[in-house]
Amino acid sequence: MATTISNPPYNMKWQHPFFAQSQERFMLGVPPQSNANYAFILTALSKQDKAVFLLPNGVLTTNNKEEQAIKKSLIEKNYLEAVIALPERMFESTSIPTSLLIFNKKKQTSNILMINADSLAKEEIREQRGQVGSKSHTSRVYKKKINVLPNEAIKKIESFLDKPGDEQGVSKVVPIETIKEQGYVLTPNRYIELKQEDIQHSSLEKLSEELNRVSSEKGAVKLTINRKMANDLGLLPLIKLLQESNETSKELNNAFKDEGVSLNTDSIVTLTNSKTFKIEVKRWDKLPDLIVMFAQMWKQVMVHYNNEENRYLMELKDIMLDKMFK
């Protein structure tokens, strides 16, 4: 069976084509222009009966109305065969958590195989040279922890795909009716029973280390933004959550100071009443993530305006030529 295998650009903006709703590939719905993730999926399934996509975990629990409708249709049409949640930090250039979604329009069962590959991963430390910025940065070598799936883990996943089954903490064969009851959420951990040892509390030292790692990733840049602009962009609820997390870290530092707990409490966002929008880089080794995301958005906007500009230039050129030869 012919299969499309794709790792498309994540969360990319796009423009609806003319008469999108009448195109066969969008019979299950037209994805929002703010995010092309589901557009890639629907386009592939309109050409092949089977497709495998590596996408960010946001596709599993999207709150977007159009995406929710498409996801619901894909499940009810029985097109989704398996979801494999991959460990975070699998890529050297980004820590975005991702999942493999396997689609099969000819599948023979009304179940979806859920796999959580977290416990199958091994941690490695790799060296990475700075990619952008000054010479002092590009000549510096950074050490970065990443997760990898060893060959035995890959073989284990393949065995589940060949013969779906349940394994505590790793996999679960879930009837579509159960997924409907769960609001069409596709996160594997929603359905997989955890092993007892997986839910034991980690040591304070380990938890502190992980919290500071996440905080460091989150604080790759510091944002200073006008309060009204933040409100207009819908950022205030998120900023409030960030501030609450920061306060919680301060409280925990105070509560566990005798245990040596020291959580990062640096502010990530500063609100101001002045007309300010400033991005300050805190971690140059994380800058490539931001550049990729910004470049994709910038490219889309620039292509749109460049096409519009060229159209007006051609019209102006035609008018000038008409006047010259009259």
Image: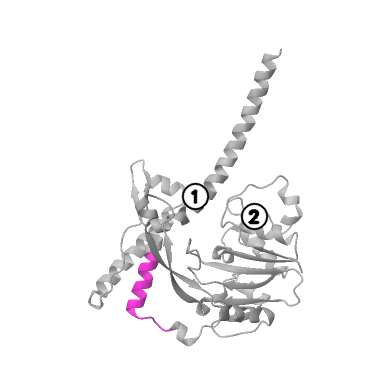
Q: Give the quadrant of residue 202.
A: bottom left
- Residue 294, numbered label: 1
Disc sitting over residue 31 in the figure: 2
Q: Position of residue 58 (x, y in %)?
A: 55, 63
Residue 15 has which mark? none
Q: Which residues are magenta?
A: 200-215
Seen at 66% across and 20% down, the residue is 319
Q: Depth check: 184 or 118 in front? A: 118
- Residue 223 seen in the figure: no
Residue lying at the far front in this picture: please name it: 139
Residue 12: horizontal and vertical position, in percent?
57, 53
Magenta region's main secondary structure? helix
Mark 2 to mark 1 CA distance (whole Å): 21 Å
Q: Is residue 283 magenta?
A: no
Nearer to me, 224 or 323? 323
Residue type marked 2: Pro
Q: Determine the residue positioned at 58% across, 58% down.
A: 64
User: In the image, what residue type sits under mark 1?
Assistant: Phe
Give the number of the mark in front: 2 or 1. 1
Q: Position of residue 141 (x, y in %)?
A: 38, 61
Label 1: state its secondary structure.
Answer: helix
Q: Quadrant of residue 185?
A: bottom right
